[in-house]
């Protein structure tokens, strides 16, 4: 028996929305019927990208106000119906949270399909839905993604979308308007194809959705309403139509107010019930694309309302306009304020529409079939070796390369990054085996053994540590036990963070490892010797999660993992050195801090919750709180972080024995000196923590593991749209850091001010 080729599908489907669920399963069903083995990529999105502007702040406030009047209806019963529906109709990958995890799928699937729904909407841009993680454009198929709008308002998003779309060799969209936008952006022609729900006939849906087994309204016939917007504005029209047709009104509830209505459908509605309700309705009133699509497929008379005003920048009416025009059903689009139409559009002649629908169905199926055939048969040859698109600059790849073909140096964005000498490279691929951004194997933190709060009993240790001093106490203990310790220091001469080794007899160096360094640490040189050192003695490595994962892979590769204690740090990203260099120059110009000032990124002073940046100068010291400090203004918001930081696979994973950081939150809000959070991920990690507490150097308490998620918020966020522009402008000597802060940080400063006011006045 011939093995089916594997196709991965990237689309929305986890949202509990009827149309979203039905389009995703329909595409799966159609691809399977074509002879492939489809799998849904279980991607956990980070939310749409946005430009941090005061206008964006105003829009956010408006959306918050709107949610006060429109609260979505959810229930356990509805959730069970969705779960049951998906269980028998799709297969899924493991949860994917980041680019590196998604990139690993390249070796598992023969082709990738993105579509349908509004996954290409500029209002919620996410490059993963453009298959940015797929190595070869020939293996990418766009099937009916919708842009959802007739105009792209944001130029930054438009440029990013254009770059993504240019990679596709098999390109289609759901609406003609989208095809026009794509041609204007890229010059490429996109086929206009049907939404996946329309690739299946009414009889196919009957069988696939088990429609006749679904619970039904007994008092038939009826007028069915399905409104994603506020239903109140439509109800006058609906009541007039009900009176004219003598049909009772039933509403599929989307909001809590709709559920409370006397007209709500008298049983819980899932995807199967949704299809059944439309099939058996005598008339459908909706403002939903998929509500309209299923009415058309089942030849049920309908009217569709314009949910968005024409001048609304979030306007998504184009998808409805396109389908109506395609099938010559434009007269079914009505203005709910027009009372006359409520009695004029009773009957609906589907003869022309059915013929056109069948033609477009055949065209769409042919496009999909041909595209998949080409995509799955393509076997691309890698001209140059690529390790990863998300380099974290750890240097593991350079360490294992026997041809010395790989070097680590600063890139144009101000980050450590690998480069490959193609003349020396023999494409052996050994570098990929130790890269922390490929073949992600680190366990999920939900499998951690225990969570602790740790606090050093030494006042001097607490004074020089960022929080509770657990890092210093661990490294001191390890050094006493004969370990070689590797950790990060700030190099004042070169004005950078870097990793160094500390050996027995060099205890005085441990103080250099204390305190936070909010920069990318240069670790490549330290990692060069890690295997040879681990062969001679036990080692303790302290670093960011990506660096820790690299060390873990290198030691495992050489059978030395048991010789190491690996400790990673709770990390929220590292900023470009262009920011740091501009910051140092700015304060030197103003305070005369000199070329090689001493730096304390977090001076605790009276309260460890109030972070203070201190730069010791030749003439005068600079000292500023994080709220007012310009470096912190960019760093805390992740505005110019390394690309890999916004797609870090280690937010909720760890290859380390221990993870340490600040124990924020209400539990220690009154503590003034600092408390460390410690996650014990392995038996070794737990043993080390237990010994530390029993030794008397630290006080420690175990806490519920879930506090890690409530306190740390360990999730990736989309990089701000202005990231690349900001990094370029940080290199511009004509622009001051103060100017750039006003330009790019005002949104966040205003948000923080509103938050403080809310807290002060208990709003």
Image: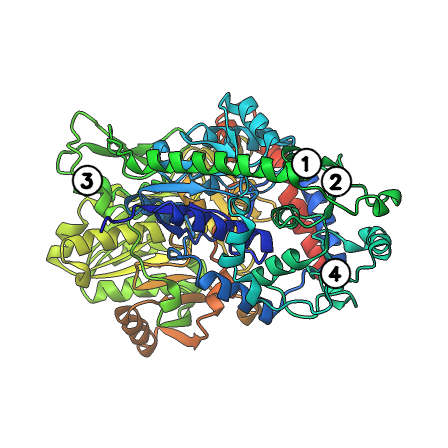
> CB under 8 Å between callouts 2 and 1?
yes
**Extreme bottom residue here?**
694
Examine the rendered structure and indicate whether residue 654 appears above or below residue 316.
Answer: below
Give me the residue at 59% from left, 30% from top.
176
Earlier in the chain: of badge 2 and badge 4, it is: 4
Callouts 4 and 1 close, C-beta under 8 Å: no
Q: How many marks?
A: 4
Task: Judge the density around disc 1: few (<14), some (14-19), many (≥20) Cα neighbours within 10 Å.
Answer: some
Label disc, if present, on residue 321 of the rendered structure: 1
- The tag earlier along the polypeptide, 4 or 1, is 4
Kindly give the residue lying farthest to the right in the view shown.
340
Instruction: Check contact, mark 2 vs mark 4: CB within 8 A.
Output: no
Q: Tag 3 or tag 2, which sits nearer the N-term? A: 2
- For marks 1 and 3, the one nearer the N-term is 1
How many angstroms separate mark 2 from mark 4 (CA)?
Answer: 20 Å
**CA neighbours of label 4 inside 10 A, class few (<14), some (14 to 19), many (20+):** many
**Closer to the N terminus: mark 4 or mark 3?**
4
Cα–Cα span, label 4 and label 1: 26 Å
Residue under label 4: 222
Judged from the image, the secondary structure of the residue bearing numbered disc 1 is helix
Disc 1 to disc 3, how far (Cα)?
A: 51 Å
User: What is the C-alpha distance between the residues marked 2 and 1?
Assistant: 8 Å
The tag on residue 333 is 2
User: Who comes first in sequence, dot 2 or dot 1?
Assistant: 1
Coordinates of residue 201 in the picture (x, y in percent): 53, 48
Kindly report which numbered mark, 4 or 1, lies closer to the viewer in this rendering.
4
Residue picked out by circle 3: 429
Name the front one of labels 4 and 3: 4
**109 sits left or right of 627 in the view:** left
The numbered mark at residue 139 is none
Q: What's the CA distance linking mark 4 and mark 3?
A: 64 Å
């Amino acid at each position: 028996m011939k093995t089916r080729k594997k196709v991965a599908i990237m689309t929305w489907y986890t949202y509990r929305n009827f149309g979203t669920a039905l389009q995703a399963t329909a595409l799966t069903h159609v691809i399977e019927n074509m002879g492939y083995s489809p799998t849904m990529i279980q991607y956990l999105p980070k939310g749409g990208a946005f430009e941090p502007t005061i206008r964006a702040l105003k829009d956010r406030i408006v959306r918050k106000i709107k949610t006060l009047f429109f609260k979505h209806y959810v229930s356990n019963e509805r959730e069970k119906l969705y779960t049951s529906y998906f269980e028998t109709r799709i297969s899924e990958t493991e949860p994917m949270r980041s680019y590196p995890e998604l990139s690993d799928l390249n070796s598992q699937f023969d082709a990738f399909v993105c579509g349908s729904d509004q996954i290409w909407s500029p209002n919620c841009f996410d490059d993963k839905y453009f298959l940015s993680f797929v190595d070869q454009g020939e293996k990418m198929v766009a099937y009916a993604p919708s842009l959802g709008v007739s105009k792209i308002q944001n130029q930054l998003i438009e440029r990013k979308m254009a770059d993504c779309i240019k990679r596709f060799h098999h390109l289609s969209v759901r609406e003609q308007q989208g095809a026009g936008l794509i041609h204007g952006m890229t010059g490429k022609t996109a086929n206009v194809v049907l939404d996946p729900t329309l690739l299946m006939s009414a009889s196919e849906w009957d069988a696939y959705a088990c429609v006749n087994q679904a619970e039904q309204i007994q008092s038939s016939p009826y007028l069915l309403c399905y409104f994603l917007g506020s239903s109140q504005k439509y109800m006058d029209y609906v009541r007039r139509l009900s009176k004219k047709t003598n049909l009772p009104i039933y509403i599929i509830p989307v909001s809590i107010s709709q559920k409370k209505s006397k007209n709500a459908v008298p049983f819980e509605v899932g995807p199967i019930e949704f299809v059944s309700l439309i099939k058996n309705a005598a008339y459908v009133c909706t403002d939903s694309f998929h509500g309209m699509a299923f009415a058309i497929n089942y030849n049920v008379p309908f009217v569709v309302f314009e949910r968005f005003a024409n001048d609304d920048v979030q306007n998504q009416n184009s998808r409805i306009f396109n389908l109506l025009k395609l099938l010559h059903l434009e007269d079914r689009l009505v203005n709910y304020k027009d009372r006359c139409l409520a009695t004029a559009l009773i009957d609906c002649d589907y003869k022309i529409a059915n013929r056109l629908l069948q033609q477009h169905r055949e065209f769409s199926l042919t496009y999909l079939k041909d595209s998949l055939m080409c995509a799955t048969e393509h076997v691309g040859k890698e001209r140059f070796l690529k390790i990863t698109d998300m380099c974290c600059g750890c240097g593991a790849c350079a360490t294992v390369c026997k041809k010395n073909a790989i070097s680590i140096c600063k890139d144009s964005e101000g980050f450590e990054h690998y480069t490959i000498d193609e003349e020396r490279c023999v494409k052996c691929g050994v570098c990929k085996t130790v890269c922390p951004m490929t073949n992600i194997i680190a366990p999920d933190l939900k499998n951690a053994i225990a969570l602790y709060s740790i606090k050093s009993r030494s006042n001097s240790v607490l004074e020089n540590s960022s929080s509770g001093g657990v890092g210093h106490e661990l490294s001191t203990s390890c050094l006493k036990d004969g370990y070689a310790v590797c950790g990060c220091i700030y190099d004042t001469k070169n004005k950078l963070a870097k990793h160094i080794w500390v050996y027995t007899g060099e205890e005085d160096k441990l103080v250099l490892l204390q305190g936070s360094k909010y920069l990318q640490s240069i670790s490549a040189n330290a990692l060069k010797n890690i295997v040879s050192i681990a062969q001679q003695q036990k080692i303790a490595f302290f670093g960011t999660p990506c660096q820790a994962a690299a060390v873990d892979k290198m030691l495992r590769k050489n059978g030395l993992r048991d010789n190491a204690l690996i400790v990673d740090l709770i990390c929220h990203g590292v900023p470009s050195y262009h920011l740091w260099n501009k910051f140092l120059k700015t304060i030197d110009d103003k305070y005369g801090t000199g070329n090689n000032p001493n730096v304390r990124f977090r001076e605790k002073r009276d309260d460890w919750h109030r972070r203070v940046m201190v730069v010791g100068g030749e003439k005068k010291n600079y000292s500023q709180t994080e709220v007012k400090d310009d470096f912190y203004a960019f760093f805390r918001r992740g505005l110019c972080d390394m690309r890999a930081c916004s797609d870090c696979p280690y937010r909720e994973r760890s290859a380390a024995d221990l993870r340490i950081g600040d124990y924020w939150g209400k539990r220690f809000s009154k503590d003034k000196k600092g408390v460390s959070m410690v996650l014990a991920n392995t038996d070794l990690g737990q043993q080390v923590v237990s010994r530390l507490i029993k030794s008397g150097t630290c006080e420690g308490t175990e806490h519920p593991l879930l506090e890690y998620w409530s306190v740390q918020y360990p999730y990736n966020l989309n990089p701000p749209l202005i990231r690349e522009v900001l990094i370029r402008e940080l290199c511009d000597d004509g622009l001051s850091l103060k100017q750039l802060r006003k330009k790019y940080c005002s949104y966040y400063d205003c948000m923080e001010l509103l938050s403080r006011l809310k807290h002060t006045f208990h709003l």
